[in-house]
Image (tube, grey):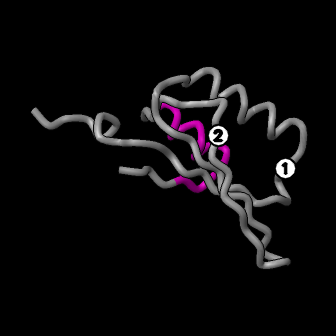
Amino acid sequence: MPLPKEMFCKGLKINVDVQRLNADFIRTLQDLCLQYTGKQALQITLYDLQAQLKTKLTSNKFQIDVSDALLNRLEKMELKYEMVY
């Protein structure tokens, strides 16, 4: 029986365009982190295509449970992500 990919995942990197940042977006992302609390690291990369800048932020406050349900929610939000192994 194959093991689920979530068992080997050490964390999740989420890419966010700074143009999408507003209070509602931040609140939704925070709610997701609270709903899917776990032991895996969360890293968010903020990028600005116009200014050609990006910065990586590692959350010390939130650790998440990388699950299919969380990944589906991120896809519905049209966020790109990468699982860290």
Which residue is at the far right? Answer: 23
Q: Is residue 14 magenta?
A: no
**Which SS class for mark 2?**
loop
Q: Which image quarter is the N terminus in?
A: top left
Residue 75 left/right relative to 54: left
Residue 67: x, y in percent? Answer: 43, 32
How many badges with numbers are in the image?
2
Mark 1 closeness class: few <14, some 14–19, many ≥20 residues within 10 Å:
few
Classify 11 as above or below 30. below
Magenta region: 69-81
Residue 10 left/right relative to 62: left
**Which SS class for mark 1?**
loop
User: Mark 2 is on which residue type?
Assistant: Ser
Residue 7: x, y in percent? Answer: 29, 34
Q: Which residue is mark 2?
A: 59
Q: Residue 54 got which mark?
A: none
Q: Which residue is mark 1?
A: 21
Which residue is at the far left? Answer: 1
Residue at horizontal 46 percent and vertical 35 percent from the top: 40
Nearer the viewer's eye, disc 2 or disc 1?
A: 2
9 or 24, which lies in front?
A: 9
User: Mark 1 is on which residue type?
Assistant: Leu
58 or 24, which lies in front?
A: 58
Q: Is residue 76 magenta?
A: yes
Residue at horizontal 54 percent and vertical 53 percent from the top: 81
